[in-house]
Image: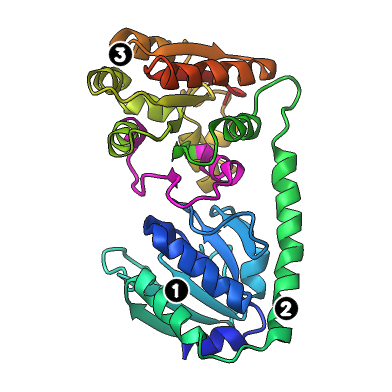
Amino acid sequence: MLVDRLARAHRPLVVTSYVGRQVAAVDELTRLCGRLAVGVLESVPAYMNFPPSDPLHQGSQWNQPVQNAALAEADLVLVLDSDVPWVPTVNRPAANAEIFHIDTDPLKPTMPLWYIGAHGAFQADVLTALRQMNAFLGRFPIDGEAADARRRHYARRHAVLSAERIGRARSADGTITAEFLTAALRNAIGEDAIVLNEGITNYDVIFDLMAREKQGTIFASGGSSLGWHGGAAIGAKLAAPERMVVALTGDGSYLFSVPSTVHWMARRYHTPFLTVVYNNGGWRAPKFSALAVHPDGYAAKAADLGLSFDPASDYGGIAAAAGGAFARKVQRPEEVDQAIAEALEAITVQQRAAVLDVMLSHL
């Protein structure tokens, strides 16, 4: 029985990517893990899946070429709603770990060469499964001493991860870092705002530094195409007109969103939202991809890969011309807080969209 296996494991770990697409599932997962002292690791998360302030939260992994410590030590791994729980060439559970998988589509037949070697795969709605496990726990004896030992272990790692996250939020050498910008936004927008993450090479920074505590307050597209954030922001504002909507995007994905159309629509349908462009001056994702596959190839030796956007477009000006949006370019760390305050006033008081074009280190 799965609940029994979780309770008896020495280092049980849940790995998830999109449990939070059903907001009620977040509370169920938090309840289950809290009662059994099970750690939670998020793998390329697209939603708020588990409270990042909870000591059982073991951070997130973003397919970096390193072994995740929580995953390596786990003797039981429960995968919930995740298409890529790990990349086994560089990061995987121990060979003797028991692996179980619950998903509406646990076999992923449309994903070639997909297999995680689970001891048990269950096709089920994860929310329903979590509710059933929690109901069973009400009649299940729990070893409190063992659970407390697990809780203390996970809390120690959580404290280290939290300190590292806080340390990342500082600016460096008078330049605006993605971490500094994201932390400033988090402090300004409040816990109820809806955040749309299309940061591409800053996906991880945005998700980790935003550290959203409420379910249903951060989303990624879940697809491989770019330009999602603009239309998604309009849709989110139409669905929840009382909520603040903030779209965080790279400069390339901003252009892919067809901002002239997006901001005309925002004015037409009265859906003011804030767009923040993480502007690194070009296509950083293709550069990273080329260097990852061919670290010693021509791309690694070339002075220029032809990926820059120089001379740059006036990203805010596009939105202003098409939709009357508030537009401001931000170039120094000391400008960030004031620029965010002005943009938030534009969307909340003036009821017009706003675009902050924030200059990061050039690619």
Residue holding disc 1: 116
Within-10-Å neighbours for mark 1: few <14, some 14–19, many 20+: many
Mark sitting earlier along the chain (3/2): 2
Given the image, on which type of amino acid does mark 3 rest? Answer: Gly
Frontmost of labels 3 and 1 is 3
Mark sitting earlier along the chain (3/1): 1
Secondary structure, mark 3, is: helix
Residue holding disc 2: 148
On screen, residue 363 versus residue 166, left or right, reads: left
On screen, residue 91 versus residue 117, left or right, reads: right
Q: Residue at x 71, y 59 (%)?
A: 158
Residue holding disc 3: 323
| Region rendered in magenta | 201-230
On screen, residue 45 versus residue 176, left or right, reads: left
Residue 29 in the image: state x and y as whole percent.
Answer: 49, 68
Front residue of 345 and 308: 345
Q: Residue at x 38, y 70 (%)?
A: 126
Given the image, on which type of amino acid does mark 1 rest? Answer: Ile
